[in-house]
Image (spheres, rainbow, N blue to C red):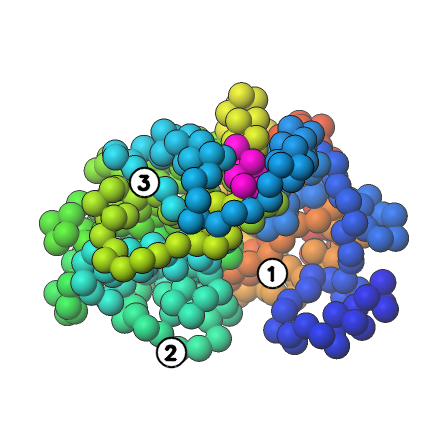
Amino acid sequence: MNDLYSRHRQVLPDWLALYYDEPIEITHGEGRHVWDSAGNKYLDFFGGILTTMTAHALPEVTKAVGEQAGRIVHSSTLYLNRPMVELAERIAQVSGIPDARVFFTTSGTEANDTALLLATAHRRSNTVLAMRNSYHGRSFSTVGITGNRTWSPTSLSPLQTLYVHGGVRTRGPFAELDDRAFIDACVADLKDILGHTRPPAALIAEPVQGVGGFTSPPDGLYAAFHEVLKEHGILWIADEVQTGWGRTGDHFWGWQAHAQSGPPDLVTFAKGIGNGASIGGVIARAEIMNCLDANSISTFGGTQLTMAAGLANLTYLLEHDLQGNARRVGGLLIERLRAVAAQLPGVREVRGRGLMIGIELVKPGTDEADPQAASTVLEVAREGGLLIGKGGGHNTSALRVAPPLSLTVAEAEEGAAILEQALRSTY
């Protein structure tokens, strides 16, 4: 392993982050478990950053990929592509967007990049509203709208970005307000911004902020924002890269917790739909999707191999009601973790819904973020046989728990026990 790490350091960028003091190589997986090159077995509660959505080595997906690879792997979007059309039909059907069109990319970054292209072209404006503490990808344009300094290496951008309050419920200037007053204050902030700028193209928002530490506003905030946006013709882009496909349990899409004023104008997706295959995409009303007045294709977006994976994965997810499983098992897991947190002075909050759970850590006796504790818990959990993630904004530090949606009650209990031991040993 040390040899592989040395080779990694020689040929890959220094800023390409690795977990753990002694990084591990994951060699194979099955169900909710993975194994490293030393033969150690782990319960996977992070799923390749929320990407292995259903299960590792899911037979239905591996079979579909193998059969498709035996026919044709790729032809580009210049030719008719049956798997791409079939997956687009399924996604349009479940999208909740009227007269939906779907464009496939290879990642969530590219999906958000495409949504920004569509919105700015449709509105003829390069001003974008985004949320504080947000993360939308690694490309030049998406870094430019990311409201999280840890993941924003440059202030240069092709866009003018204005950041709105509301993505974090329990921190910031409105944290002490009740939910209704919180929403009202954030809406007033939005209206104030709109009085000081040229007309924006869109608001882009994650219903639950992923990299930011699984934070979210009260249900209905984005519906209230949407009412204001519609008055000005401003588009609403829901970044569902991490929240889509039933992960939050209560809803198939994260935006549905904010659906009182109708669906978003655009939805971006990626990660879980491919169960590890590189799929991203944008769903939009036809008038928005078709607004481009120049040629545009995607060489690898919608390639037959990934589309076969996505079709098989989505079919499995729907037929086995994994959204319902996320709601039931996730509900048990979050209550179990809250019971543990109540006994530990370093756990400020356990939050989330479904199988998207954040555990915010602070230095005991303070409200100050404790990133070193988060790293320690990550290490101790790994030693105990559990893989989790971490995140947070400029003054937060959180553990991220997001297992595959097929997680069983027994596995949830096992993972919670390991995580409890890791937290107790840290605090």
* Label located before the other in sequence (3 or 2): 3
Residue 73: image quadrant is top right
Rounded to the nearest whole Å, what is the CA distance between mark 3 and mark 2? 31 Å
Q: Residue reaching furthest top?
A: 319
Checking the image for residue 364, the label placed there is: 1
Q: Is residue 271 magenta?
A: no
Rounded to the nearest whole Å, what is the CA distance between mark 2 and mark 1? 38 Å
Location of mark 2 (residue):
156
> At 46% across and 71% down in the image, what residue appears?
152
Q: Nearer the viewer, mark 2 or mark 1?
A: 2
Checking the image for residue 245, the label placed there is: none
Location of mark 3 (residue):
101
Contact, mark 3 vs mark 2 (Cβ under 8 Å): no
Contact, mark 2 vs mark 1 (Cβ under 8 Å): no
> At 25% across and 48% down in the image, what residue appears?
290
Return the x and y of residue 338 as percentages of the image width and height: 58, 40
* Label located before the other in sequence (3 or 1): 3
Give the amino acid type for the residue marked by disc 2 in the picture. Leu
Q: Tell me the SS state at disc 2.
A: loop
Return the x and y of residue 171 as percentages of the image width and height: 41, 58
> At 44% across and 54% down in the image, what residue appears?
298
Res. 373 in view: yes
Res. 404 in view: no
User: In this rendering, is residue 353 above or below 27?
Assistant: above
Which residue occupies the foreground of this view, 108 or 214?
Answer: 108
Q: Which residues are magenta?
A: 304-311
* Label located before the other in sequence (2 or 1): 2
Left or right: residue 260 versus residue 51 is left
